[in-house]
Each structure stands twice: as C-alpha cells, then as structure tokens.
Image (spheres, rainbow, N blue to C red):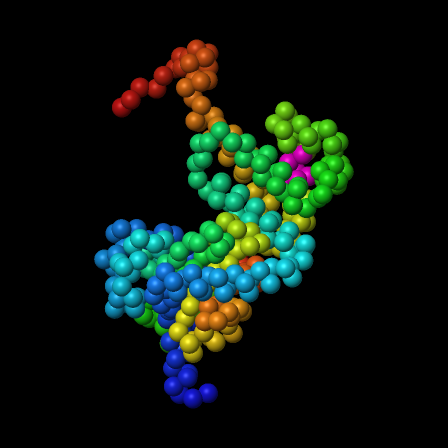
Amino acid sequence: MIVTDTTSGKSHQVKIEPVESGDYKNITKGRYFFDWAEEKDWEIYKLRIIDSRDILGLVSFERIPAEWRIHIRLLSVSKENKGSAKKYKHITGNLITYVSKIAIKEYAELACVSLKPKEIIAQHYIDKYGMNITGMTLSVEIIEIMNLINTYDHD
Amino acid sequence: MTKKKNKVLEGAEYGVDSRYTSKKDKEVDGKTLMEARLKRMNNLSEDQIARAKLLQLKLKMEEYISKPVYQDNNFFTEFLTTYIDTIYSKRSNFAKDIDITPILLSKVINNHREPRDEFMMRLMIHSEKTYKNICEFHKKTWFQVYFHEKICDTMSSQDKWRPKVEKHVNVSKLIKAE
C-alpha cells in the first residue's frame, strides 16, 4: 500500500499495524480529532510510512462474526492530512482496504465492512469507495472489496 | 456545489465517528443490513465466490508465512487442498492440469509423500495463471509456505530429534570466545 505526497507526487510505502500502548500519548484529540483512548477495548490500527514513526491515520473497529461483518467505529487522518491542503493522499482508502482484507480473511465471500457516517458525508464515501447504502449504514461487500484491493493494495 | 457542502465533503476525509449509540441500534442496523446483503449475496456468480475464496486463501497464506507458527497442523497441504477444491469439482482434474497422476496428488495431499521441486514449480505456474485476474500473487508464496512449515516443525520439535542427532555432531575445531 502507498500514500502519495500531494506536493511532490512521490509515493511512499506504508505499514498498517496495531496501535501500541506507547502510542496513546502521541495520538491526541488535537491532531487526530477523536479521543482514541476511549477505543482501547477495541482493535485499533495505525498507518505510517515505512521508515517513519509518524502516524498518518487511525482506524478502530469491531468484529461481528455472527454477521460476517466488521464495523468501523472511528477512522481519522492526522490534522495535516485533512482537506484540500492535505500532505498525503490515499490514507483513508488504505485504512478501509486494510479492514476489508481482514474481513475477507475471516469471512471470504460473506465479508462485509460497515460504517455509519453522519448524513451528508455518506455521499462522499459512496462516491469515492463505491459503498452500498442500507438505511443509514454504508457497507462494502465482496465486489466493492475486490475493487478496493485492486485500487489500493499492491503488496 | 455550495461552499457549505464543499466544506462538509472536505471534512469527510478527516474521519468518521461511526460508533453505535446503543446495543439496540447495532442490532437493528445489523438486521436491516443483513437482509439487504443476503439479496446481494444471492446474485453472486460462482466465479465471484471462487475469487473471494482464493483471495481469502492468499491472505491466510501470507499471514502464515509472516510469523512463526508452532502448531502440529499440515499447513501446506491444508492450503493446497483449499486451493484445489475451490477451483475444481474433482481433484483429478487438477492433477491432469499439472500433468501428474491423481495417485501422486493424493499422496501429497494426504502427507504420504513430500512434494518434489517439479510439483512445486507446476503449482507455482498454475497459481500465477489462476490469480492473474484476481489479485497480486507472489511466485514464491507456495515455496515460502512449504519451507516455513518445515522450519517451524523442526525448531519446535528439537526435544524429540536433538538428543539423537547431537550424538553425531562433534566440533573438533572449536573457536574460543574472546
């Protein structure tokens, strides 16, 4: 997986791995928008450029095996990667794809990754990641997951 | 697009708080979502299902080779069996496709014979062709799985083989510590 520097156009390989206890002092609400310490009971993964310790994005999620589903609880990029002036692009896409790969590994053709964003921003996720909409819930299932993997995962 | 909408969509990329506010919320959403998913699942073709299973297999193999696993399972043959059974309704058809006898394939699958280089190389080429239209698949994956299992098995069973083997090892020219 890669992120692209929006200024230079240079691509960087990234690593997505579980957040460690020592990370919590650095993942502040000021830089990552949410209180990530509240998510300690869930699985939380961080995205960083290989050879850098700086965390560019975070995701927490819950596995729901009875429904062959993983529900994304929180997802965020770091402050400097927000909006049109972002430093790197593809952070969110990589994080969603990573969670989707876990879902495929667990549930194969039954895999589903869901999230429930607030109203208006839902359209952004539908347009950008090809998400299905059911009521207020957005989801990617096998067909969308394969598309995400082919777009974001080159490992 | 209005300035306000632009700003909201720009904000969408910073993140999502998607936590359920109650257990009931989660259950209701799960149920509604499941109904919609089942309809979509019913429309999946056999090929789409096979693609998903093969992707799952690839991810499981990659996970296996990424860390030491000290379990007494036959991982290589389990992965191989999944691979064959996902693609073929009869294992003998896979044997035919890689030009080996069904008896030899059966022996490999049932751990009565080690796969030889020839078998591994044909499996590698077969997988390359199978995964070509699905996802990236490294040529070395099957070899890595096979040798990873050998390494893990050997390292984890030292108490069984070491006493006997060590009797046959003598270092006549021992390099002294500094």
Please tell me which residue is depicted at 60% across the width and 45% down the height of the picture.
B139
Task: Name the chief secondary structure element in magenta.
Answer: helix
B66 horizontally vs B131: left or right: left
User: Image quarter for residue B12?
Assistant: bottom left
Q: Residue at x 44, y 64 (%)?
A: B28
Residue A38 placement (x, y as % from top left): 27, 59
- In reply to whether residue B122 is colored magenta, the answer given is yes
Check the image and name the residue furthest to the bottom: B2
Residue B174 placement: quadrant: top left
On the picture, is A50 further left or further right than B99?
left
Residue A51 on the magenta span: no
Q: Which residues are magenta?
A: B119-124
Q: Position of residue B49 (x, y in %)?
A: 63, 54
Q: How many marks?
A: 0
- What is the x, y in percent for residue B72? 49, 29
Q: Is residue B159 left or right of residue B100?
A: left
Taking the view exactly as shown, the residue that stands out farthest to the left is A25
